[in-house]
Structure formats: C-alpha cells, structure tokens
Amino acid sequence: MMKYETEIDFDSRNVMTLLIDLIENHSKILEFGPASGRLTKYLKETKSCEMWIVEIDEEAARAAIPYAKDFVIGDIMEYEWLEKFSGQCFDYILFADVLEHLQRPEEVLRYAKELLKDHGKVLVSLPNIAYNGVLASLYHNVFQYRETGILDQTHLHFWTSQEAVSMFERCGYGAKLVDAVYQPLKNSEFSLQYDTLPCVVADAVKSRAYGEAYQLVFLLAKGRQTETVQKLIPSTGYYFIQTFTGRGNDWEDYEEHSIPVDLTKEICFQTKISRQADRFRLDPLNAECVAKVVVTDQSGAKLQAKDANGMWVGNVFCFDHKDPQIIYDVSEGIKTVKVKIRFLIYHQKEIYQWICQSMKEQSDRIEQKEDYIGQQRKYIEICEQKLCERNGIIEQKENYICEQRKILNYKDKKIREQHGTIEQKENYICEQRKMIEEKEIELHQNQEKLKEYNTFINRFGIRQLYHFYKKRCQKRVIQK
C-alpha cells in the first residue's frame, strides 16, 4: 500500500468526508494529488461528478485513472496540466493535503484560478501547524519530523489558519476557514502530552480556539468574498462556563447554557432573564479557579453575589473544587445580565500555591504588625514608666505643697492670733491713753487747784486755808 493510501472512513470526521460534504452532485472537478483515487472514485460513482486528475506518482495515478475523464502524470510545478486542461472550466478544484508539498504553492493557486468557473470553488485542506501537539513539543524544544502527520518530512510549508487565509487572499481569492478535523492530543502522533507542561501553560494551551484542529479545510472563491456555512467548533470543550436562570431552589428546572472559554482572555457575554426568574446562577468554570467576576443588569448596575460555594472578597472569587457556583438574586425588571470574567488562576495546584503565598503574605503582615505592636508596647511601657516617675514627682510636689499649706495655715493662725493680741494691746493702749488723758486732766485740775491754794495761801495764810479746807470736807460729808 502506498504511503498516503487509506480507505475513506465514513464513520468519522476526516478530510475526505468533509470535502465530500462541500461538493455538489454532477460537478466538474479538477483534483490535484488524488493518490490511488479513493476520493476520485467516490465522487464519480456516488455523486456523479466528472473528474480530471493530476498525480506525480505513476503507480498511484494508474489506479485512479479509471475514474478520471482525463489525467496528467507528473509534477504539478511543471504545469503540464495548465496547458492540457486549458480548454476546461471547473466547478471545483481540489487540493487535499497537497499545497504543503509544493515549492511555490501561491504560484500554483494563481494558475489554477484560470481553470475555475466564475462561481467555482477551490477546496483546500492543510495540516495545522498551530496544533496543540506541536506547541507542547516546542515547549520542550522538540520539532521532530516524521513519516506522516503534521510534521511529515516531505512538507515544505506550514501554515496557521490565519496565515493560510492571508496566502489565499494574496492569490486573489476570497477565503474562509469552514471546517476542521479534530484530533485529541492523546490520540495523535505526538508523545509529549498536556501533563508534561506546567499547569498554567497546559490550561492555556487546552483552552485555545482550534487548538486540537489537526487539519484545516478552506473554501476559496474568485474575488474577495465567499459565502458558505462555517461548521467549525472553536473550542474542544475542556473548559466552559454555565449559566442557570429560573425560580426557587430546584436547579434542574432552570434554563441552562454552556459557553466554551479561552482561559487566557477576558470573557464577556449576555444572558436573557425570563420574566418568572428570580435567581441567576453562574458557574464560572468547570475547574478550580480564582476569577474576577462582574455581573451587571441591562442598565449597567452591578449585581452583588448572594451566595457562593467558595471564598470571595468584593468581585474576586476563589474556588478550590471543580464545581464553582455563584448565586445572584434577580429583581423584577431585569431582562438581561452581562457577565464579565477574567481568570486570575485556574488550576488546583496554582490555587493552592496562591493560597499558601497569600497565607504567607498574611503571616508576614501579621508578624510585622505584631512587631510593630511589640514596639508600641515597649514605647507605652517607657511612657508609663516616665508617667509613673512624673506622677511620683507630682506626688512629692503635692506633698510639699500640702506641707507648705499646713505651714501657711499655721502661720496664718499665728498671724490671726498675733492680730488678736495686737488688737488687745491696741485696746489696752487705747484704754491707757484714755487713762493718761484723764490723769492729765486730773493733773491739770490739781495743778489749777494747787495754784489756787498757793494764791490763797499767799493772800490768807496757811491757817486760814486749813479752816477753809475743813469746812469743805464737812460740807461733803453732809452732802453724802
């Protein structure tokens, strides 16, 4: 069996089945790289298509030729097909895992456009170099070519979905990524799995849009625009948000919605609230996480969380289990709620480390505060000691003042006593003065009398004075 020869598996999503779904019956098709013609045969026999093929491997081409209306065996880059089929216009031109093998794929696309009908389409499948298996390997500095697969050793070019679209547009096509073949990393050829990555890196890689898209399918049309239905699944569903709206506590009866998330980006979405609903439950992630969650109503007013099965401060929530829930009360008149979520940490180990770090920081802050309190206590003790010393000094001064007051009171008493004594003496002096004055008056009177007696004696003699004094005394006796 040839290297790229496999049967079409209609029980799974693969490039062949995706291309078949995009092709209408009775179409005229140019197929590049048909190998042994497994797709060629199906399109001819089942969808009644007319097939033209270009194949470099002669053995494979011989197996496919019975199903082709015409063929070219040779290198695509030699452009024999362009000359041979120049009179044909095709509904579809197929490049199923072909362009990555060509030296100048853009040149081939430009020439192929000459054979395409105005409303024709070019279908291209490419391996996705941004597949998570490649990223996991690159993280470990591994880029190993293989016999087959994304890193097939014959691949000359690699594209991401965006780079491929840019290339198609440079070639004059309107291009759109319409579908993809998804391959879980554990089922791929890559041996380095998610568990070989650090937790944060693994979670970020898992949540990437189209991260497990193994092969990309593009639809190209002439001009700058193409209209088709996009069947891509942006996320493989590792992580998702759930919302529940309803009434009461029976969550099984609530209206439920799931939203896949990219953990590395801020998530914004709106949810309608039914008229009868009085509660809104938000499950921010189906894993452990620390997230900043803001929920507002249609007017922009913030809703406050009523309950949660984790810890929260303000609008930052921490959950150490895989079923986080936040419950909000919904008042009448709220028709829609807008949810904004930014994941800060989203793995149990990282949350544990974050909690440990937070506890350490809290412990350090507590220790610092205890040291500060200890210093303040020492300062207070010094202040209290100084206060006691000052109180002792004040007490000594108060005792001294008391003693001085006693002395003053004693002296005041003595002064009052002295005042009393002085007053008595002054009264006594006053009395003595009065007595002296009386004595002086009496003395004066006696002196006057003495003068009179002397005068009388001088005039009448002493005998006559005696008789005069005697009469006077007798007269006083009689009067008494």
Image (tube, helix red, strand yellow):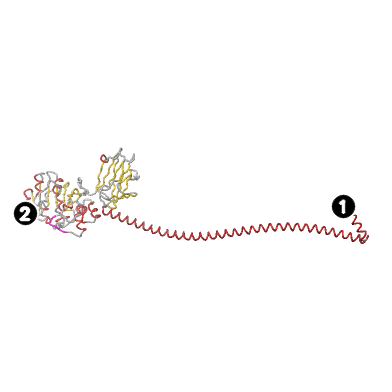
Under mark 2, the amino acid is Glu
Mark 2, other Cα within 10 Å: few <14 / some 14–19 / many ≥20? few
Main secondary structure found in the magenta portion: loop
Res 159 visible? no
Residue under pointer 1: 477
In this rendering, position of residue 251 left or right of residue 410: left
Q: Is residue 146 magenta?
A: yes
Q: Which residues are magenta?
A: 144-148
Q: Earlier in the sequence, mark 1 or mark 2?
A: 2
Residue 382 shown left or right of residue 238 in the figure: right
Would you place residue 365 above or below residue 252 in this image?
below
In this view, the residue in front, 94 or 386, is 386
As measured in the structure, the alpha-carbon distance from the residue carrying label 1 to the one carrying label 2 is: 199 Å
Query: Could you tell me residue 69's position as x and y percent?
Result: 8, 48
Amino acid type indicated by mark 1: Val
- Dot 2: element: helix
Mark 1 element type: helix
Of tags 1 and 2, the one toward the viewer is 1
**In this picture, residue 426 sits left or right of residue 272:** right
Residue 413 locus on image (x, y percent): 64, 57
Q: Which residue is mark 2?
A: 59
